[in-house]
Amino acid sequence: MTHVEDVAAGAAHMLADGIRSAGLKVTAPRLAVMRALADAPHSSADRVFGAVRIELPGTSLQAVYGVLTAFVASGLVRKLEPAGSSALFERRVGDNHHHVVCTRCGAVHDVDCAVGAAPCLVPADNAGFTVHAAEVTYWGLCPGCQVALANEAITESAAAESATDIEGERMSV
């Protein structure tokens, strides 16, 4: 067995152990979903399905939804629901982290909690609830979109300047 094959086998074994430790049966679709989320955190069910279908062509979208639902219920996977977006899934669980979402392209990244322990926010009036966690979503522009917007502004400014120059030439004729 080559080193690469050995590493892949070890990773598959770790994924299988994680599934078993959650009290779930290890199946090919469950392993494929875990691999897909390892490769692309913050993925929608459709994106996970696309990755799983490459590995297991006979798998249905409904099967992927079933696996994701079981994983969320067992605590293996976390489901995020950013406003205006499809539900997203990630394997990073068990810590107190939040997310930052780009308002332009929808990119999502993990952000460690500034406070640390959950819940990191305490409501002024908990209405009798025992609060276990608070979900914080930061919204802003990712670095790539900041550059793209700056470039668009430069292009628009140059176009407006060019139009002004052309209009000025017409008036002087």
Image (cartoon, rainbow, N blue to C red):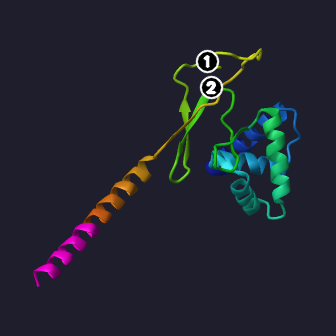
What is the x, y in percent for residue 143?
42, 47
* Left or right, residue 72 beside residue 168: right
- Comes first in the chain, label 2 or label 1: 2
Q: Secondary structure at mark 1?
A: loop
CB atoms at circles 2 and 1 under 8 Å apart? yes
Q: Which residue bears the numbered disc 2? A: 96
Q: Main secondary structure of the magenta part?
A: helix
State the residue at coordinates (85%, 54%).
Answer: 63
Q: Secondary structure at mark 2?
A: loop
What is the x, y in percent for residue 111?
54, 33
Find the residue positioned furthest to the front.
171
* Residue type for callout 2: Asn
Q: Nearer the viewer, residue 150 or 66?
A: 150
Q: Which residue bears the numbered disc 1? A: 117
Q: Image height check: is 19 above or below 62?
A: above
What is the x, y in percent for residue 58?
84, 64
Asked if the stretch drawn in magenta spans residue 30, the answer is: no
* Left or right, residue 118 beside residue 16: left
The quarter holding residue 168 reads bottom left
**Mark 2 vs mark 1, CA separation in Å:** 6 Å
The part of the chain drawn in magenta is: 159-173
Q: Residues within 10 Å of mark 1 (few under 14, many from 20)?
A: few
State the residue at coordinates (31%, 65%).
Answer: 155
- Which mark, by number, is residue 97? none
Q: Nearer the viewer, residue 154 or 111?
A: 154
What is the x, y in percent for residue 77?
73, 38
